[in-house]
Image (tube, rainbow, N blue to C red):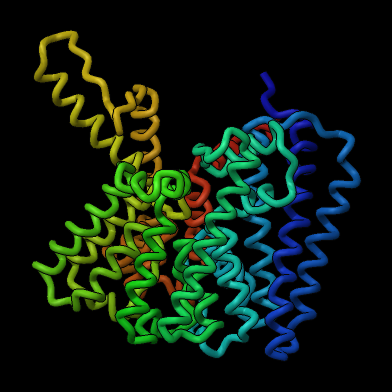
Amino acid sequence: MRYIHKNDIYTVLHYSGQIMEAVGFMCLVPVIVDLIYGEANAHWYILVGLFSIVIGYLINQNIASETKNIRLKHGMAISSFAWLWAALMGGITFELVTNIGILNGIFESMSALTGTGVTMYNDVEILPQSVLFFRAFQQWIGGLGVVLMIIGVITRPGAATMKLYKSEAHEDRLKPSVKNTLRKTLKIYFIYTIIGIILYVIAGMPLFDSICNTFSTISTAGMSIKNDQMGFYNSDLIYIISMVLMILGATSFLTHYKMVKTKGRAIFKDVQFKTMIAIIAVSFIIIYATSNIIPMHSLFAIVSAVTSTGASIDTSQVMGTWPIFPCLILAIAMIIGGSSGSTSGGVKLIRAILFIKGIIRRVKESLSPEGRIIPIKISGVTISDKEVYESGNYIALYLIFIIITWSIFCLLGYDPFKSLFGVISLQGNVGLDLGIITNSLDPILKVAAIGNMWVGRLEIFPILVTLAGIYKFIKK
């Protein structure tokens, strides 16, 4: 039986053409900053932007009449391609403006878009302001998702919107209509962004830095515009503001929406939010009791890890000197990640909760009289066996991808623990590093790392479906 037909390719290309046009406009935004600072790089942004717009337009014009109704498999393929195309256009831009090299440029772009935040630049403070802004803007766009940000603005309501919404691993709805859900989500995201910028300015941070750092923290991306990371500002107030923004970004947008409706009460009823705070508190106590790391620095790192932000007060070289045990705690937090339906990465808190509850249920049923069935409930809602099973499957698959890339690191002679920490960070779209993910990384590992960031951001299955579809189409 053939699962992939010619019309499927037309459908994917049609919607991908629209995405390509939108990505082109995204590449034009830094032109404003370039002109403000007189950096004379505007032509490169315009060149790449127009290229993406023209290619997308031509695809739309030539195959629009061949399209059919979109299905979930199409949405998954469109999302998978969208992230690669956005990373490619961003990578070409970075290469043209800064001569970083095309592979490093694509790595940088994928890192920004997926909210990973690891950089290939050895010195970010010598970069043009337009490049620093473009990296921050990519993080902000990628926080919600490239596809979601686009369809929230330009797409009409309908089945296509729903399929694209699901394709980036989103299920929660704030409103019955997906279109209205996206609009409401964008509104919440924008409001928090404005608040973050204002708070940073009040705390004494320059306006440009405030914009870039807000884009970076609310999107839980963490890519810094300073070589010394957030430690450059040497301000506890700025650290606290950053942690608040990170936690807000890692909290489900559905919870934010309910919080407004219930005057703040909903956030204290959200199991994911309560679990996230508990993980932060317990991890901080453990690290405080077992190491000599400055408390504010360790707390900041824990919040950054569990929210998958990757921002830090210390540089990766300094963190590389930390004891192994605190780093192990951070690695576990990075695997767990933040809330489902937020900007964060990792396996997501809800999956971790279901996984643990599934284990507990299995033990209880083994000890109970034969035939007894113990339901799993979260916030009073009974969870189906299918959801528990799918959570376990996803976590297993997630760890398999980590092991594969880690094995390549070890094969090429990299430090086993530091490389494991780095791969966990890449897969979880975090960005914390112990000094191993740098410009000097082996090209093979850079390609593998790009794959991990891509897979982690789209939560694996869309990419597997896309690759399987390509294989089936070629095989026919």
Q: Residue at x 45, y 44 (%)?
A: 261
Can residue 386 be seen here? The reply is yes
Image quarter of the N terminus: top right
Q: Is residue 448 above or below residue 339?
A: below
Q: Quadrant of the rendered structure where residue 377 is?
A: top left
Q: Is residue 154 left or right of residue 135?
A: right
Q: Quadrant of the rendered structure where residue 8 is?
A: top right
Can residue 404 be seen here? The reply is no
x then y, percent, for residue 220:
44, 62
Q: Is residue 151 left or right of residue 249?
A: right
x then y, percent, for residue 232:
38, 86
x then y, percent, for residue 50:
82, 66
Q: How many marks?
A: 0
Q: Residue at x 13, y 19 (%)?
A: 366
Q: Is residue 296 above or below residue 404?
A: below
Q: Residue at x 74, y 74 (%)?
A: 45
Between residue 196 and residue 222, name the one nearer to us. 196
Q: Residue furthest front?
A: 263
Q: Residue at x 55, y 70 (%)?
A: 108
Image quarter of the C terminus: top right
Q: Is residue 435 above or below residue 373?
A: below
Q: Is residue 319 left or right of residue 406?
A: left
x then y, percent, for residue 445:
47, 63
Q: Residue furthest top?
A: 371
Q: Is residue 146 above or below residue 210?
A: above
